[in-house]
Amino acid sequence: MKAVEGLSFDVDKDDSLAIVGESGCGKTTVALSILRILRPPGRIISGQALFEGTDLLTMPPSELRRIRGEKIGMIFQQPQAYLNPVLKSGPQIAEVLEIHRGHNHHKAMEETVSLLREVGIPSPEETARRYPFELSGGMAQRVIIAMALACSPSLIIADEPTSALDVTVQAQILETIRKLRERYQTSLVLITHDLSLAAAACAKIIVMYAGRLVEAGDTDAIFKNPKHPYTQLLIASIPRIHSTGELAGIAGSPPNLVNPPTGCRFHPRCPHVMDICKSVDPELTAAEAGHIVACHLHKGV
Amino acid sequence: MLHLLRHNRSTLVGAVLFGFFVIVITLGRAVYQVNPFAVNTSNKLAPPSITALFGTDLLGRDLVARALLGGAISLYVSVLSVAFSMALGVPLGLVAGYTKGLVDELIMRVMDIILAFPALVLALLIVAVLGIGINNAIIAIGFTGIPVFARIVRGVVLRISELEYVEAARALGFGNLRIMVRHVLPNVRSVIIVQVTLSLAAAILTEAALSFLGLGAPAPLQSLGGIVQEGFPYLQNAWWYAVLPGILVTVAVLGPNFLGDGLRDLLDPRLRG
């Protein structure tokens, strides 16, 4: 079963890219594969992950460990689960500094406190002494962000960083990430199922469906001129604050990747399906400058 | 609810029994100043009395004094054996559970081979090879206890190494050794503590059996099992010689056993949660 196939994207320095898609479309697999932390039986079969010129996928493990946590930071979905329950939060952040920057414990703890303050935690010294289970979801996520940003990485990969949090906390966390990105000029790859979140946080968006890239482009272009029927339906399903009537959804459910549909994988759910869609898999073509789509409705401009 | 209470009571009993045993053994000889080596052939095999609560042995030595010393030896050998089992079993289980694959298979098959032997038989074998002595007894008993620790630790580590915070540690660029020792191992603590109490009970019993067969700590520093062995021929006419130290062994074994059982029940649902 191929979780992801034929995916390609670029992120420049100080750029932000959102990978959007439903659960099971393969977006988390992409994130884990970049840093090669995908667990067996998952495997990377082919491809490259070029970071600052070098391919991460063929790098020796000792070099890769220096990139992880130092040049590339990751933020995950459920903050409490991603913190060690038997260690206090301060030492967990300090450990990153001790390993990657060679600080002694004292210096690392000092820097930890200032990091906690930077991510917007009101009483950093106290929080550093708390165990993860004593923190709220938002606080725990800030601790994780502090850990990811401790060594001022050039890239942050955030996999659904706010999905497990309250909406108000979501906004705060996003704001924190935005401020830190500005300060450190960190690039961001944001993985989310929430298209409106992607629009708020990122300059570019790629849309995934069933392991494939179906549309990619600047956020503006995607929202003003969505080409792929899936993207159009996603945008239409975003609740508008003044709208009345039923919420629009997308009929059907994502395909089983063990036995995917023939031709275009979206064709069983597509409102504009044509005969060709059932047998031929559409290739990615440019719909306009900087905007690509894989759909038989848009065969070249 | 009642279930928990019932187990809580036996845990308490276990803790009290074992605590009592340890305190008596460690402080007893300071309080009860009778010389366990003082031979007094005019008073041999005397029944329990006010002056000698456990009676005397075949050389007239006070059995309470001997039991206190013997208990200390039993405890010494057992505790060191368990430490030995842990020192080897925990790292093996940790590596097996974290690394998985071929390494896991190899380690676990070796553990299976050791487990195939009943503990006493294996300990006998090792003592037969190494010779009789207190240190050899520790090695022998300790060796039989290694697989239990390895298995228990491996089981928990298999589960923990798939958890999210281990994934996060990898994403932060931590090396495997550091992750194993600093992130996985501390989360295995509770399981190890439970197993220590249970292994201690088993070690005390195996040690007593070994000594009873004459292969444990040699005279004059016999453990409780050694005293039982001495007193065994006199069971008919001087029952106190073998029985009373034997009861002490029972207390010493039951104590940590109950304690360990109760601790395991107390910690188990939290382990799975």
Image (tube, helix red, strand yellow):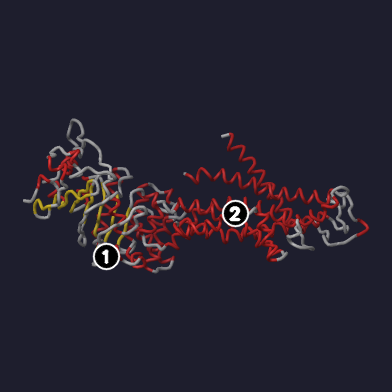
Q: Amino acid at mark 2?
A: Leu
Q: Position of residue A103 (x, y in %)?
A: 40, 68
Q: Is residue B45 left or right of residue B170?
A: right
- How many labels were placed on the picture? 2
Question: In this figure, which residue is indicated by the disc labeled 2?
Answer: B115
Location of residue A289 with respect to B267 vertically, above or below: below
Question: In this figure, which residue is indicated by the disc labeled 1?
Answer: A55
Q: Observer-nearest residue: B131 or A9? A: B131
Label annotation for residue A208: none
Extreme right residue here? B42
Q: Residue at x 38, y 64 (%)?
A: A97
Element type where label 1 sits in the image:
strand
Q: State how far apart marks 2 and 1 are (Cα).
A: 47 Å
Q: Position of residue B130 (x, y in %)?
A: 68, 66
Q: Is residue A130 visible?
A: no
Location of residue B263 with respect to A145 vertically, above or below: above
